[in-house]
């Protein structure tokens, strides 16, 4: 029996059964109450409450209902009925919400109340572990966090585990949220996430019932921020290629600077990728400009590094169909200076549906001329091809020199030029002023397969 003895002002705890002093009065009924154990713990979560009721004449009060009560929200206690000798028993079940609970009894039929008996609640210390499936990964890849909750080496099932990621806000702009897991029959828990930033993880098992809370910390799991590589690409009819793109990491604050991006080419867009240029980002941007001779497919690829994850842009197609011009024919290659001759030729293109070359009708062709011994070409005349791809032009022979024709291409075809120059020799007839006609007035830069 647990008793409290007092000496002076000091109280001395004597182990045994905890008993409330009987409520006695001359000629009055009485009740005494005791707890069989002074405390409860995870291994012994209940205790028996015993008591005895005496009638006013001091005899045992048999078959009398006894109402037992405890603090609201701190547990439960059963009611009881006295036996023939006036005794009764009840079971107290604390829920662990407090460090102690009080129990008291009422006998409504006799109008008596007991003093309170206090039972201590001893909470058990739990252990929580936490491990990660990897120590480093790329943003968007899964990370599994797992562990176990135990008490004195025994698993605790049905426990809630709160996992909180701690990030450096100066290096991570994407929020990472606290999440929860629950333990199974073996006390184990597991949760898979896709972290956006490098973080340290703390697993916290909150206090519940007869168990104290506990925590475990997993050192920082590094995450390479995901990047996005964009690319736009154009190629004009003369083979001038222009590429522009960006390298961006949303979770790392935006533009990615000072990184090398590879511009790669493939003839079919699936295989055989080859590096055409190496570019470096500035303010998250990169660009390139150069001459190419082929249609094909392009992509920008960032290989990644220790701090940033790799990415590849969408594939861009720059495609033009081949065109061809016949040798320029002249109606005469020897003519009086400033008189007219007729030049003609044909323009054709490749048709993918026919898998062969055919006439290219309705296209503008430029006739050009340069004097012998000179490099400057002059525009002479625009003509348009007919339904069979043929063109004809009446042009002035300004002097000894060469005629040629060029085609500037369309949105999906290459530019072209006549394969060689047609030479015309002129002869002069003396006349007042020394000349009888104007020279060409516009200089042009022809393109006939090279720049």
Image (cartoon, rainbow, N blue to C red):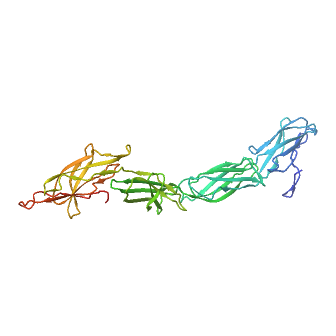
The answer to which image quadrant residue 32 occupies is top right
Which residue extends farthest bottom?
A: 373
Between 143 and 352, the one lying in front of the other is 352
Specify the quadrant that holds the C terminus: bottom left
199 versus 60 height, above or below: below
Q: Is residue 212 visible?
A: no
The answer to which image quadrant residue 335 occupies is bottom left
Between 366 and 3, the one lying in front of the other is 366
28 vs 306, left or right, is right
Q: Is residue 234 visible?
A: yes
Residue 189: image location, x then y, percent: 69, 50
28 vs 451, left or right, is right
Residue 97: image location, x then y, percent: 74, 48
Residue 437: image location, x then y, percent: 12, 57
Between 24 and 159, the one lying in front of the other is 159
Between 359 and 274, the one lying in front of the other is 359
The answer to which image quadrant residue 231 occupies is bottom left
Which residue extends farthest left?
A: 432
Residue 403: image location, x then y, percent: 22, 56
Residue appearing at x 50%, y 57% in the figure: 253
Q: How many numbered callouts?
A: 0
33 vs 183, left or right, is right
174 vs 7, left or right, is left
């Amino acid at each position: 029996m647990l008793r409290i003895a007092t000496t002076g002002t000091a109280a001395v705890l004597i182990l045994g059964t905890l008993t409330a002093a009987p409520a006695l009065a001359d000629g009055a009924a009485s009740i005494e109450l005791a707890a069989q154990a002074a405390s409860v713990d995870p291994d012994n979560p209940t205790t028996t409450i015993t008591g005895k009721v005496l009638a006013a004449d001091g005899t045992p009060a048999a078959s009398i209902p006894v109402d037992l009560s405890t603090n609201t929200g701190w547990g439960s206690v059963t009611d009881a009925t006295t036996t023939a000798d006036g005794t009764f028993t009840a079971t107290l079940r604390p829920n662990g919400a407090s460090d102690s609970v009080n129990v008291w009894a009422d006998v409504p039929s006799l109008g008596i109340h007991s003093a309170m008996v206090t039972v201590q609640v001893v909470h058990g210390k739990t252990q929580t572990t936490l491990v990660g499936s990897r120590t480093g990964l790329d943003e968007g890849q899964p990370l599994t966090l797992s562990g176990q909750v135990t008490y004195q080496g025994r698993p605790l099932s049905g426990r809630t585990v709160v996992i909180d990621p701690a990030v450096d806000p100066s290096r991570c702009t994407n929020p990472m949220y606290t999440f929860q897991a629950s333990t199974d029959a073996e006390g184990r828990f597991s949760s898979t996430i896709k972290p956006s930033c490098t973080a340290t993880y703390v697993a916290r098992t909150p206090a519940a019932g007869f168990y104290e809370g506990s925590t475990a910390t997993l050192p920082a799991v590094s995450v390479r921020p995901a990047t996005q590589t964009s690319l736009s690409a154009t190629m004009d009819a003369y083979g001038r290629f222009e590429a522009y793109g960006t390298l961006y990491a949303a979770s790392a604050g935006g533009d990615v600077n000072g990184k090398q991006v590879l511009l790669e080419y493939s003839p079919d867009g699936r295989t055989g990728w080859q590096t055409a240029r190496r570019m470096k980002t500035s303010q998250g941007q990169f660009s390139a400009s150069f001459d190419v001779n082929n249609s094909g497919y392009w992509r920008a690829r960032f290989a990644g590094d220790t701090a940033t994850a790799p990415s590849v842009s969408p594939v861009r197609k720059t495609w033009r169909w081949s065109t061809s011009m016949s040798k320029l024919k002249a109606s005469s290659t020897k003519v009086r200076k400033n008189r007219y001759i007729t030049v003609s030729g044909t323009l054709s293109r490749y048709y993918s549906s026919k898998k062969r070359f055919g006439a290219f009708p309705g296209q503008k062709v430029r006739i050009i001329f340069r004097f012998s011994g000179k490099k400057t070409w002059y525009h002479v005349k625009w003509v348009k091809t007919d339904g069979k791809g043929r063109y004809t032009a009446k042009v002035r022979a300004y002097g000894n020199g060469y005629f040629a024709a060029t085609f500037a291409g369309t949105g999906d075809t290459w530019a072209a030029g006549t394969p060689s120059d047609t030479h015309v020799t002129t002869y002069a007839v003396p006349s007042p002023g020394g000349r009888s006609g104007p020279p060409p007035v516009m200089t042009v830069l022809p393109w006939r397969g090279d720049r």
